[in-house]
Amino acid sequence: MIPEQEWLTKARQLAVGMKIRVRHLHEKRENLIIGNLPDRWYSYCHKCHEGGVILKDHVILNNTAPPDIEVTLPPDIKLLAGSEFEIPVARFLSTKNMAIPYLPVLYYSEMRKRVLMRADAKWHGRDLTGRSPMKWLNYESARVVGHTGPLGVIVVEDLFSKYKVEFAMRNTPGFGVVCALGTGCSSPLVTRLAKAPRIFWFLDADDAGDTGFEIARRRMRPFVQHQLRIRPPEGLDPKDMDCASIRSLILGGSDGRA
């Protein structure tokens, strides 16, 4: 197989349907064919008798599958690492300010077009197509994910934010991170937070996050005296912030300055 760096850049510069012949490395003749098809870029060298094919991300992740709202666990779960979907999913994650190292072991369902992970022994799936009305599906009736810590608990709305915050705080022990799986303060969430020494509400910086904080703060008041709203920059989720900014904001709040 011809390495990507020897032909893929040229292929991406072509209009869909075009192909060209160029010299391959130090060959004297234009033996290398490079092309751009609707679903893939390709190359083939008539001298080396080798080539390469890269499927386009939108074809791998989106194709013609209908939006997925099926709440049963996909039957075709496969490990993401080492699969043909690893690079497209990594690219998708980067558009959400996420990266594979932030997350637990990832799986993929080609049928449902979701990246899946296990958290608190239950499955969760994130849509990759942008067309599903349900970004996250929480299988097996999951209602809350994560645990408190001796210094306090940081509460976020979604799993990407949970794992991004955990990664940012990995060298600062004592803080637990809990994902509420939304902005609501459900009874399972109340139970999970009831014995926390302090709650840092790190909900999204939007109207839903602000309203959710006020409702949750009132509901948790009989159980936890010290509660702070740790607010990301306007319009952002915790996962949209870089790790240094997340850590600085939380530690500032833990000192009573937030």
Image: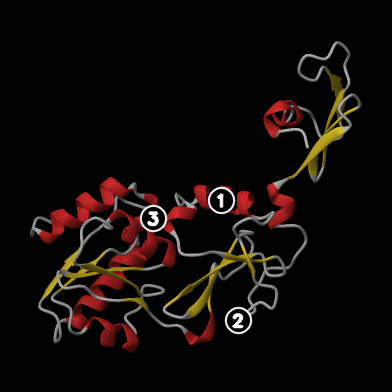
Residue to which mark 3 is pinned: 239
**Residue at figure coordinates x 43%, y 61% from the top left:** 160
Q: Residues within 10 Å of mark 3 (few under 14, many from 20)?
A: many
**Residue 14 % position (x, y):** 78, 28
**Image position of 172 with respect to 114: above or below:** above
Residue type at mark 2?
A: Val
Quarter of the image where the C terminus is located: bottom left
Answer yes or no: is residue 1 visible.
yes
**Residue 47 % position (x, y):** 89, 24
**Residue at figure coordinates x 42%, y 67% from the top left:** 159
Mark 2: which secondary structure? loop
**Residue 213 % position (x, y):** 26, 71
Front residue (pair 257, 28): 28
Q: CA distance from mark 1 to mark 3?
A: 15 Å
Q: CA distance from mark 3 to mark 2?
A: 25 Å
Mark 3: which secondary structure? helix
Image quadrant assignment for residue 237: bottom left
Q: CA distance from mark 2 to mark 1?
A: 24 Å
> In the rendered view, does 158 fall on the left or right side of 52?
left
**Image position of 149 with respect to 129: above or below:** below
Contact, CB < 8 Å: mark 2 with mark 1?
no
Answer yes or no: is residue 237 visible.
no
Residue to which mark 2 is pinned: 71
**Residue at figure coordinates x 26%, y 57% from the top left:** 169
Residue type at mark 3?
A: Lys
Residue to which mark 1 is pinned: 90
Front residue (pair 147, 199): 147
